[in-house]
Amino acid sequence: MSREVLLVKLALCQGMGIEKKWRLLQYAQHYQRSDLSFQEILRVLGYNRFSETLRQNWQSLTPDEINQRMLGQKYLSYDSPLYPTNLKEIAYPPLVLFYEGRKELLQKRLVAFVGARDATAYGKRVIDFLVPEVVRANYVVVSGLAKGIDSCAHEATIACGGYTIGVLGTGVDLCYPSQSRPIYQKMKKDHLLISEYPRGTTPQKHHFPMRNRIIAGLSQGLCVIEAKTRSGSLITAQQALEDGREVFAVPGDVLTGHSAGCHDLIQDGAKCVHSPEDILSELPQF
């Protein structure tokens, strides 16, 4: 078994998180191993107890089974020369990126837009105001294909002739939420969809914070629009700050609470955005 196959095996294995998968990969690399027994896994991870799911998954993932599972799946492993450099800078990057569409977009300059799922007319107007200038500056727009601000960002990018990347919390063969299907189909063909989860993976609550770290890690800057005080967008913004990315926030109505999280970000040092230039002036222009 090669290191490439080990990367894929770890990505396919259910029953342990990304931090533990990286610990196993580093152990294998240190000892120049390309396969690990289940007993080794228990020892390296210090498990006294373990889930039956983990044992069954690991032992069933033989090289032949891995080849069968990966048939028809497009992917970039961590060792691929096309794996995005920015993403390698985060604490626990995906071991494998599954994708549909134009993988070369990962090599472009990327900026993310995230925000409320229950976006107001104001939030949608803000997207239509900011995105076209960002696209004209040759940035690719990244978001999470959720309803609300995410979908608006993808749609606005396509409408003005730009390119966009959707980061999913499911396999790239599944559209979630179902309302996003028209834009999902368009992006699958002409843009890019990526996920660290293999085909057939259904939406799980814990997948979406993990997806958010990819959005933050890919992008050189992240702009938050209409985030409430308790919002997944704030988790993404915090991740972006930890990764050393530029974080921007758009102010909103102080009476409704729709942008209270954005106001908190601005008070904590995020750049307040009044125009596209507020974003572009902080990002590389080459």
Image (cartoon, rainbow, N blue to C red):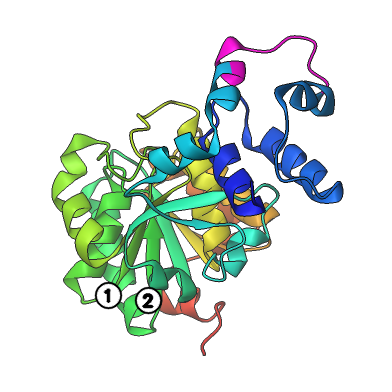
Image quarter of residue 14: top right
Q: CA distance from mark 2 to mark 1?
A: 9 Å
Of helix, strand and loop, which one carries label 2? helix
Q: Earlier in the sequence, mark 2 or mark 1?
A: 2
Q: Measuring 39% from the left and 67% from the top, which residue is drawn there?
A: 103
Q: Amino acid at mark 2?
A: Val
Q: Secondary structure at mark 1?
A: loop
Label 2 crowd (10 A; few <14 / some 14-19 / many >=20): many
Q: Which residue is mark 1?
A: 162
Q: Is residue 176 left or right of residue 93?
A: left
Q: Residue at x 53, y 39 (%)?
A: 63
Residue 259 on image: x %, y %: 42, 45
Is 81 on the left or on the right of 231, as rendered?
Answer: right
Q: Nearer the viewer, residue 27 or 179?
A: 27
**Image side of residue 174 versus residue 19, left or right:** left
Q: Position of residue 132 (x, y in %)?
A: 28, 75
Q: Magenta stretch: dominant SS?
A: loop
Three-letter code for the amino acid on which mark 1 is drawn: Gly
Residue 171, quarter of the rendered image = top left
User: Does 99 sit above or below residue 16?
Assistant: below
The residue labelled by disc 2 is 134
In the image, the segment drawn in magenta is: 46-55
Work out whether residue 250 can be spotted: no
